[in-house]
Amino acid sequence: MRVDHAAENHSRLNRLALNLLKREKTIKASIRKKQRLAGWDLDYLLRLIST
């Protein structure tokens, strides 16, 4: 994380992931629950990424 632009890249990926989770409205759950569900369920993860 300390080399070149790694911290900035990591920050942008985190923001992108949070924005995808916030935008997804098919499941009414907290961001934390959506994160866990995306880690457990490949179909849900693909739905998040494809929207």
Image (tube, grey):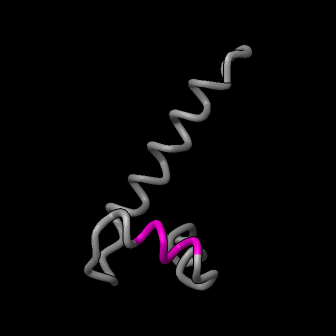
**Which residue extends farthest right?**
3
- Expressed as whole percent of the image width and height from the top left, the position of residue 39 reads 58, 71
Residue 31 is a magenta residue:
no
- Expressed as whole percent of the image width and height from the top left, the position of residue 10 reads 59, 35
* Residue at 68% in and 16% down: 2
Horizontal side of 50 relative to 23 (left or right) equals right
Region in magenta = 34-39
| Picture quadrant of residue 24 | bottom left
* Residue at 49% in and 53% down: 17
**Taking 44 as reference, is 8 above or below it?**
above
* Residue at 32% in and 61% down: 22
Horizontal side of 23 relative to 50 (left or right) equals left
The N terminus sits in image quarter: top right
Residue 37 is a magenta residue:
yes
* Residue at 41% in and 71% down: 34
- Total marks placed: 0
